[in-house]
Amino acid sequence: MADAKPERGGVEVFTLLVELGRARDDGLPEGATGGAFLCYAAGRDEAEAVRETVAVLKTAGLNPLEVTGQGTLAERRAAGEEIGPEDEALMARALAENAVIVAQKTWFGDA
């Protein structure tokens, strides 16, 4: 994948780290006090990607507390990060589907 920046309207894929709290019927494992999701989200800018990600997670019954932007694919590479082929494929999918993809889940507490 050359980059996660298509010609259509300047949409890019942003890497976001979302911290989750507990909510009624959230589906988190028993014993979890919260969690974190690493997401790839399409948007014209990071603010739009964050808004879409929070909306999708709330629709799923989750309780997003804080979102930290990690940058676009190009920004992460420029910072020296190595991006594996699986993550590149997930970013390409987020771009193609104009979607939010949860790439990794981490639970906090005794889960």
Image (cartoon, rainbow, N blue to C red):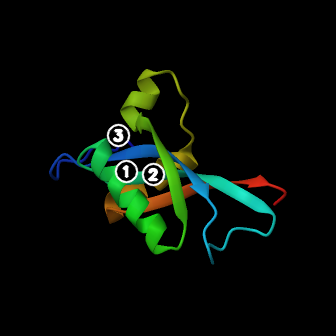
Q: Earlier in the sequence, mark 1 or mark 3?
A: 3
Query: Dot 3: what SS?
Result: loop
Circle 2 is placed at which residue position? 40
Residue kind at label 3, given as amino acid type: Asp
Tell which tag, 1 or 3, sits nearer the viewer.
Answer: 1
Query: Dot 2: what SS?
Result: strand
Residue 61 in the image, given as x and y percentages of width and height: 53, 73
Comparing 70 with 23, the one in front is 23
The residues bearing labels 1 and 3 have C-alpha atoms spaced at a distance of: 20 Å
| Quarter placement of the C terminus | bottom right
Residue 38 in the image, given as x and y percentages of width and height: 56, 49
Residue kind at label 1, given as amino acid type: Val
Circle 1 is placed at which residue position? 50
The residues bearing labels 2 and 3 have C-alpha atoms spaced at a distance of: 13 Å
Q: Earlier in the sequence, mark 1 or mark 2?
A: 2
Q: Is residue 35 left or right of residue 74?
A: right
Q: Residue at x 17, y 48 (%)?
A: 7
Answer yes or no: is residue 105 visible: no
Answer yes or no: is residue 58 visible: yes
Tell which tag, 2 or 3, sits nearer the viewer.
Answer: 2
Q: Residues within 10 Å of mark 2 (few under 14, many from 20)?
A: many
Q: Is residue 21 left or right of residue 14?
A: right
Answer above or below: position of 83 versus 6.
above
Comparing 107 with 72, the one in front is 107
Residue 32 in the image, given as x and y percentages of width and height: 76, 61
The residues bearing labels 1 and 2 have C-alpha atoms spaced at a distance of: 10 Å
- Residue sitting at the far left: 9
